[in-house]
Image (tube, rainbow, N blue to C red):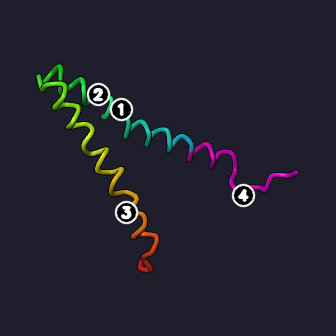
Amino acid sequence: MSTPESGLTASTRAGYGFGSVATGTFGTVPGLLLLPYLTDTLGIAAAVAGVIVFAPKAWDVILNPIAGRISDRSTDP
């Protein structure tokens, strides 16, 4: 059993991998630091801070599949 060639060089794959790590870090670190900042620095109640952090994520969970379905069915670029 042979695996198909991807057509990408190892350096290209590594470049995409490093870019993905950078993008993931940029998207994850602020979320990790936001809750302690809201509660410790700004003095917001933990329940309110939790809702502030959770609400955008819940919004994404609900709307991303809808937006994906619309964009997949779109014929315009």
Residue at x 16% of width, y 32% of height: 48
**What's the magenta region?**
1-16
* Left or right, 47 with reference to 74: left
Gap between marks 3 and 1 measured at Cα:
27 Å
* Left or right, 55 with reference to 21: left
Dot 2 or dot 4, earlier in sequence: 4
Which label belongs to residue 29?
Answer: 1
Which label belongs to residue 7?
Answer: 4
The single residue placed furthest to the top in the displayed view is 40
Residue 18: horizontal and vertical position, in percent?
53, 40
Which label belongs to residue 77?
Answer: none
> Could you say whether the residue bearing mark 4 is in a helix, strand or loop?
loop
Residue at x 63% of width, y 47% of height: 13
Dot 4 or dot 1, earlier in sequence: 4
Gap between marks 2 and 4 measured at Cα:
39 Å
Between disc 2 and disc 4, the foreground one is 2
Q: Nearer the viewer, residue 8 or 24?
A: 24
Tell me if residue 73 comes above or below residue 36 in the rendering.
below
Gap between marks 2 and 3 measured at Cα:
29 Å
What residue would you read off at disc 2? 33
Amino acid marked by disc 1 = Val
What residue would you read off at disc 3? 66
Q: Nearer the viewer, residue 77 or 46?
A: 46
Q: Nearer the viewer, residue 23 or 54?
A: 54
